[in-house]
Image (cartoon, rainbow, N blue to C red):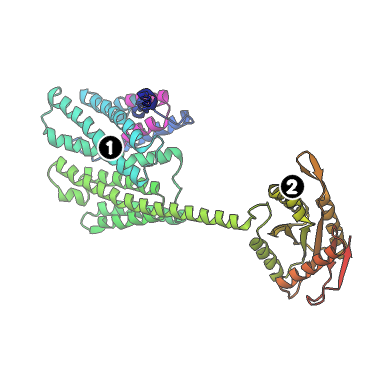
């Protein structure tokens, strides 16, 4: 009889739904951001617009880069939809009216403001889709993905702008040259400023820095001073020293600090060049577009010096932090017993050896559960493990009253080290209290069972001694307690290891 044909609907994996939210510019905004973040972003936007428009615009109306659009993009990345679009509207109105400082509000000005918003709307879904919704653009692979996104968004925005200027506003300028300048201006603004603005909003400026704040501040001041002096003295090659200075900043400061320094240096360099000062203006004395074509590769070169260096150094720092964390976890794991909450044997012996080496006073107790094999044979090894865990917990509670540590030496044998000086009577009383605590019933299933223990104790006194001798005295005392009938303790006075008979035994 042939086997039945399987139902295709039951075996075929259903097609994955298309998540249109991946491309929404408002997807996964950070809900905790509110009016305070909006105020910070609006202040940054106004500051960048004023700095670029007042300092970096030449007499022909060109800027080498426009970083203010990065604020609009970050608003779409970190704010909720209503807040983000509200801020975009406020920035648009401010750019068209208030931030122009008396410049005429014509069709070209309105077009530029509209396209500033448009480039953010184009770049936001692409950034979310390929760089992460709450991304950190200082990471190498995310920054590498963001660069073509910025170039692509700027290309589309600039193409629309050039078409409107050429065929609607009848601009006589060379369309291709204007388009190239427009693309590089807006793309550089996004690439240089977006990572820094994101970090400013999230307050991550000082994270991942290798040097002290003073060293970082000195290097930042040196870079800014070099930018100022080298462009005030265009006849000198000092501007070439900007590259090693920025490399030092990238090595010592966080990645965000390096990008902020590049942003500040870019404003300084663009401002001097726009006013016919500095070495780049001397290289291109004729033609504003030619001057911009020189300054834009220079700014991009500054960025390429900082980003790969800071990314490599940051990756090494993150690797070292992970390695340190792994080592700390391994050390913590090695310090703890694999079954009980007590210390491991190695860690306990190291603590005891350190106490003896520094000449400290204290006491050592070796504790065994009486006839523990009967527990495993009668109730099973799993129940025996639970008894050991509870046994260790009670010892740790007892040790905590006298700054003590508890270690598991193996099987059912434990050790307790006290780091305080106890007279013989006090040590005897302490051992009796431990015995009583350990003798309290253990709940197994629905019944209570009592298990006893034997303790061998020895004082630790200041003076030359070896851990092996202290352990041997406590071990002899433990054997004496067991020989006396168990469920009791024995204290070894200060005797030689070869004289185990000098013991006092208490039941």
Relative to the observer, which residue lies in front, 396 or 244? 396
Q: Is residue 226 visible?
A: yes
Q: Quadrant where the C terminus lies?
A: bottom right
Report the residue that reaches farthest toward the front.
1
Please tell me how crowded label 2 is: few (under 14), some (14-19), or many (20+) other residues with Cα within 10 Å: few
Residue identified by numbered label 2: 379
Quarter-of-image position of residue 102: top left
In the image, the segment drawn in magenta is: 66-92
Residue 104 coordinates in the image, percent (x, y): 23, 25
Q: Secondary structure at mark 2?
A: helix
Residue 403 lies left or right of residue 291; in this view the side is: right
Decide which of tag 2 and tag 1 comes sooner along the chain: 1
Q: Mark 2 to mark 1: distance in Å?
A: 70 Å
Residue 356 coordinates in the image, percent (x, y): 71, 69
Name the disc covering residue 150, or none: 1
Q: Residue at x 65, y 55 (%)?
A: 337
Residue 63 coordinates in the image, percent (x, y): 23, 38
Residue 339 coordinates in the image, percent (x, y): 65, 52
Q: Secondary structure at mark 1?
A: helix
Residue 481 lies left or right of residue 243; in this view the side is: right
Q: Residue at x 38, y 56 (%)?
A: 251
Quarter-of-image position of residue 365: bottom right
74 w.r.t. 450: above or below: above
Q: Does the magenta segment cover residue 82?
A: yes
Front: mark 2 or 1:
2
Q: Quadrant where the N terminus lies?
A: top left
């Amino acid at each position: 009889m042939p086997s039945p044909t399987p139902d295709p609907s039951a075996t075929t994996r259903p097609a994955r739904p298309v998540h249109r939210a991946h491309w929404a510019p408002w997807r996964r905004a950070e809900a905790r951001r509110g009016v305070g973040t909006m105020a910070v972003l609006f202040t940054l936007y106004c500051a960048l617009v004023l700095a670029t428009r007042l300092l970096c615009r030449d007499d022909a109306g060109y800027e080498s880069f426009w970083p203010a659009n990065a604020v609009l993009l970050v608003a779409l990345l970190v704010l909720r939809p209503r807040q983000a679009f509200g801020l975009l509207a406020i920035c648009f109105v401010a750019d068209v009216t208030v931030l122009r400082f008396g410049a005429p509000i014509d069709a070209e000005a309105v077009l530029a403001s509209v396209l500033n918003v448009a480039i953010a709307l184009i770049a936001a879904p692409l950034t979310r889709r390929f760089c992460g919704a709450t991304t950190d653009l200082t990471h190498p692979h995310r920054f590498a993905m963001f660069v073509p996104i910025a170039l692509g968004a700027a290309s589309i925005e600039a193409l629309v702008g050039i078409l409107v200027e050429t065929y609607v506003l009848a601009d006589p300028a060379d369309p291709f040259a204007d388009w190239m300048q427009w693309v590089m201006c807006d793309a550089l603004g996004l690439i240089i400023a977006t990572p820094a603005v994101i970090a400013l909003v999230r307050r991550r400026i000082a994270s991942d820095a290798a040097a002290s704040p003073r060293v970082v501040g000195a290097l930042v001041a040196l870079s800014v001073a070099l930018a100022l002096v080298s462009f005030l003295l265009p006849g000198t090659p000092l501007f070439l020293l900007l590259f090693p200075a920025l490399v030092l900043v990238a090595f010592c400061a966080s990645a965000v600090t390096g990008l902020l320094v590049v942003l500040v240096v870019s404003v300084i360099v663009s401002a001097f060049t726009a006013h016919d000062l500095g070495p780049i203006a001397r290289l291109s004395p004729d033609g504003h577009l030619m001057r911009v074509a020189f300054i834009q590769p220079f700014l991009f070169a500054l960025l390429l010096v900082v980003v790969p260096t800071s990314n490599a150094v940051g990756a090494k720092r993150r690797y070292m932090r992970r390695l340190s964390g792994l080592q700390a976890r391994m050390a913590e794991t090695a310090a703890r017993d694999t079954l009980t909450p007590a210390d491991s044997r190695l860690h306990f012996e190291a603590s005891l050896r350190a106490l003896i080496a520094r000449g400290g006073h204290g006491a050592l107790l070796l504790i065994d559960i009486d006839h523990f094999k009967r527990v495993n044979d009668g109730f099973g090894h799993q129940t025996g493990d639970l008894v050991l865990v509870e046994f260790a917990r009670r010892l740790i509670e007892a040790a905590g009253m006298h700054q003590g540590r508890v270690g598991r030496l193996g099987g059912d044998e434990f050790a307790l080290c006290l780091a305080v000086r106890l007279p013989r009577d006090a040590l005897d009383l302490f051992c009796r209290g431990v015995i009583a605590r350990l003798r309290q019933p253990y709940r197994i299933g629905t019944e209570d069972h009592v298990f006893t223990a034997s303790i061998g104790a020895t004082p630790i006194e200041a003076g030359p001694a070896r851990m092996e001798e202290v352990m041997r005295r406590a071990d002899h005392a433990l054997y004496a307690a067991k020989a006396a009938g168990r469920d009791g303790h024995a204290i070894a006075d200060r005797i030689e290891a070869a004289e185990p008979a000098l013991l006092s035994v208490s039941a």
